[in-house]
Image (cartoon, rainbow, N blue to C red):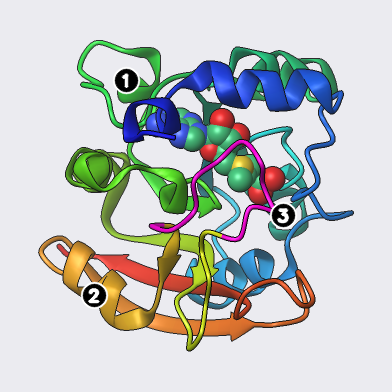
Amino acid sequence: MTDKQLNDKSIWDEIYRKTENKPGWDLPGADPNMTDLIGKHGGKDDSMRILDVGCGNGRNAPVAESLGAAYCGTDFSSSAVAHCRELYPDRDFYIQDICADLEGTELGESGPYDVVMDCGCFHAIPPQQRGAYIANAALLCRPGGLLVIGSWHRGEGVDGNDPQYYPYLYLSEWFFNAGDIESLFGNTFELIDSRVDRDVYPGMFDGFAYFALRRCK
Ligand SMILES: C[S@@+](CC[C@H](N)C(=O)[O-])C[C@H]1O[C@@H](n2cnc3c(N)ncnc32)[C@H](O)[C@@H]1O
């Protein structure tokens, strides 16, 4: 599979369609590490606005509910977003490629946000598009705001090409550790916290990593 296919939203649409919006990575309930890191570093202000980038089927919308924050989601899969709109008719959802030019788009106009969370989207962005993702994350996150990213952890002995996990997707580039994140995001964000959780997806690779970054002022 080529990088072009990796970035093809029809692949994601097909996954959501075929699985009836239960793609498998959407564990029951909101991701507890996201809730914890945002609660810890996002502030307790009840006017807090959270943007969920690559929101998928919206399973992390309750992260905002539990923190009393406003929630908005965006994804480039129109089937995922249609599902979210049905589930949460009172919330805003945008169909948007996060690596595209956001000027004049609904998503671009909607920010900046206090918190940008991303559980499993950034690690799916092909390497040549990471710069565009990071520039847009900096645009969407207010100065002093928080960006929280969840990705496969780049630990020892990880075989990212084992096809048993996601037969659709080429995985070798999907792994990050704290040093990788610092060197990619370091011009606009400061890494303030990170952890690896080996229990969220037991037995898969070397766990799932979470990175909390503060947007530089
Ligand atoms: C592994 S899923 C995670 C979904 C959700 N965050 C969750 O935790 O269940 C990655 C999501 O990122 C979306 N995605 C991938 N590349 C994207 C891009 N360039 N722009 C917007 N969304 C993207 C996919 O459509 C998919 O819904």
Q: How far apart in space, not on screen, are marks 2 and 3 (Cα)? A: 30 Å
* Residue at which label 2 appears: 182
Rendering quarter of residue 185: bottom left
Q: Amino acid at mark 1?
A: Glu
Q: How far apart in space, not on screen, are marks 1 and 3 (Cα)? A: 40 Å
x, y (%) of residue 180? 28, 74
For residue 143, the mark is none
**132 in relation to 40, above or below:** above
Residue 66 magenta-highlighted: no
For the question of whether residue 30 can be seen, the reply is yes
Residue segment shown in magenta: 162-173
Sooner in the amino-acid sequence: mark 2 or mark 1: 1
Q: How far apart in space, not on screen, are marks 2 and 1 (Cα)? A: 28 Å
In the rendered view, does 167 fall on the left or right side of 41?
right
* Residue at which label 3 appears: 164
Residue situated in front as seen by the camera: 157 or 58: 157
Q: In which of the image's four quarters is ligand 1 placed?
A: top right
Residue 164 magenta-highlighted: yes
Dot 3 beta carbon under 8 Å from ligand 1:
no
Q: Residue at x 63, y 52 (%)?
A: 163
In the rendered view, does 2 fall on the left or right side of 129?
right
* Residue at which label 1 appears: 109
Could you say whether the residue bearing mark 3 is in a helix, strand or loop? loop
Sooner in the amino-acid sequence: mark 1 or mark 3: 1
x, y (%) of residue 77? 57, 20
Residue situated in front as seen by the camera: 204 or 197: 204
